[in-house]
């Protein structure tokens, strides 16, 4: 018998969603035997809005257009598309919620202003999810700053168990795998055991020290330690900025792919002998204060149960990198402390 999965996508008129929606609808993620109903959320239309150029449209109109295109794909798996500006409706009965929408950083805005502005969005969305979502809901936060947005949403939607809340470090993970593969001259599939520790920001620690290439420690295959520390790590940390410089727009295709990979891994499990990276609510693993949304290595079984890989160790470089990203996340938590009830 075929199943039906309801998937909410916020920021549905934005560029990441545009690159993601058809893949969610197509059967690629949930399988050909599962019907998909998409719930697209955008911000309400502004009545006094003046288009900055003749082709500009309000986000809700774009989401409506995207829904038309999704229907026009004729996917056998797609049952319906709901478009709304009401979070309660968007999250009603959903089994997955991909929170992509967030306010961008405006001119002259400090990082902490962005944390506060987005924090308020995620207070409301956390509450709306707890009130409306299906009892098995899983949530992936993509909108930045995604770890701390997830922290805020989780604290405001605590009726949903902590293990269901994730923030996306999968794009960083895929970047980190690919950069090692390119350097070693091997296919991506030869690179395993990569972890993005900590924050989805330029303090993240793309851990090459525990990574493997064709089953051997990556540091034995790529013996140029200086390259690993001073080229590889900053390249991974600053890849988002490099994409913006090249495209004039932030990552969308690869970001959508990261979100699709994340959901697939949590639906189908990780391959034997490898793990993936996800930011999850810490229970204190690796000395991270409990409750912080921190990027970890995780394995997932075929029933969507996940666990953090334990027992990895760090050398002096790794310890310093780990501490740096942890410190940043603690500072972010402090900046949104007024938005965290109890
Ligand atoms: P866009 O600006 O193209 O789209 C964002 C959309 O979100 C807009 O249409 C906006 O109207 C909508 N939105 C804003 N507030 C909303 C709310 N309260 N409810 C519903 N929708 C809302 O950005 P895009 O390039 O699609 O990026 C989306 C988010 O992903 C950004 O926050 C971005 O920083 C973040 N990213 C996160 C990544 C990650 O790895 N975690 C990588 C890619 C991406 O940069």
Image (cartoon, rainbow, N blue to C red):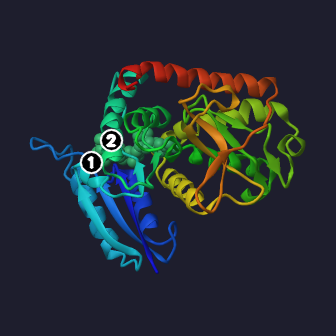
Q: Residues within 10 Å of mark 2 (few under 14, many from 20)?
A: many
Residue 293, given in percent of the width and then of the height, sits at 54, 34
Q: Earlier in the sequence, mark 2 or mark 1?
A: 1
Residue 223, given in percent of the width and then of the height, sits at 88, 39
Query: Residue 143 — which label?
Result: none
**Vertically, is 232 above or below 179?**
above
| Residue where numbered disc 1 is placed | 87
User: Number of labelled discs?
Assistant: 2
Residue 304, given in percent of the width and then of the height, sits at 58, 57
Q: 112 or 228: nearer the eye?
A: 112
Q: Is residue 24 visible?
A: yes
Q: 221 or 99: nearer the eye?
A: 99
- Name the residue at 74% across, 29% down: 230
Q: Residues within 10 Å of mark 1 (few under 14, many from 20)?
A: many
Instruction: Report the side of 195 relative to 50 (left or right).
Output: right
- Name the residue at 57% across, 56% down: 266
Instruction: Report the side of 220 relative to 283 (left or right).
Output: right
**Vertically, is 20 above or below 252?**
below
**Residue 233 falls in image quadrant:** top right
| Residue where numbered disc 2 is placed | 125
Mark 2, ligand 1, within 8 Å: the answer is yes
- Name the residue at 29% across, 66% down: 81
Please tell me in which quarter of the rendered image ligand 1 is found: top left
């Amino acid at each position: 018998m075929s199943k039906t999965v309801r998937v909410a996508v916020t920021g549905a008129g934005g560029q990441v969603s545009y690159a993601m929606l058809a893949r969610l609808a197509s059967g690629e993620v949930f399988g050909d035997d599962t019907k998909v109903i998409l719930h697209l959320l955008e911000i309400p239309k502004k009545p006094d809005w003046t288009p900055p150029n003749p082709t500009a449209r309000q986000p809700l109109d774009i989401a409506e257009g995207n829904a038309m295109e999704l229907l026009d794909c004729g996917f056998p798996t797609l049952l319906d598309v709901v478009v709304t500006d009401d979070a309660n409706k968007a999250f009603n009965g959903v089994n997955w919620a991909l929170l992509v929408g967030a306010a961008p950083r405006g001119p002259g805005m400090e990082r902490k202003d962005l944390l506060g502005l987005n924090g308020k969005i995620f207070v409301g969305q956390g509450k709306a999810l707890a009130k409306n979502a299906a009892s098995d809901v899983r949530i992936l936060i993509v909108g930045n700053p995604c770890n701390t947005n997830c922290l805020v949403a989780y604290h405001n939607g605590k009726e949903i168990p902590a293990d269901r809340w994730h923030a996306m470090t999968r794009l960083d993970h895929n970047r980190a795998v690919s950069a090692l593969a390119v350097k070693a001259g091997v296919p991506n599939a030869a690179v395993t055991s990569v972890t993005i520790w900590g924050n989805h920001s330029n303090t993240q620690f793309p851990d090459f020290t525990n990574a493997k290439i064709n089953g051997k420690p990556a540091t034995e295959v790529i013996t140029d330690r200086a390259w690993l520390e001073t080229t590889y790590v900053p390249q991974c940390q600053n890849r988002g900025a490099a994409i913006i410089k090249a495209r004039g727009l932030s990552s969308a295709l690869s970001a959508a792919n990261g979100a699709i990979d994340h959901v697939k891994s949590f639906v189908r499990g990780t391959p034997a002998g490898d793990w993936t990276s996800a930011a999850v609510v810490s229970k204190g693993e690796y000395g991270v204060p409990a409750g912080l949304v921190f990027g970890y290595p995780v394995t997932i079984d075929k029933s969507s149960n996940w666990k953090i890989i334990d027992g990895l160790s760090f050398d002096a470089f790794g310890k310093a990198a780990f501490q740096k990203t942890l410190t940043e996340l603690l500072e972010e938590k402090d900046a949104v402390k007024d938005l965290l009830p109890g």
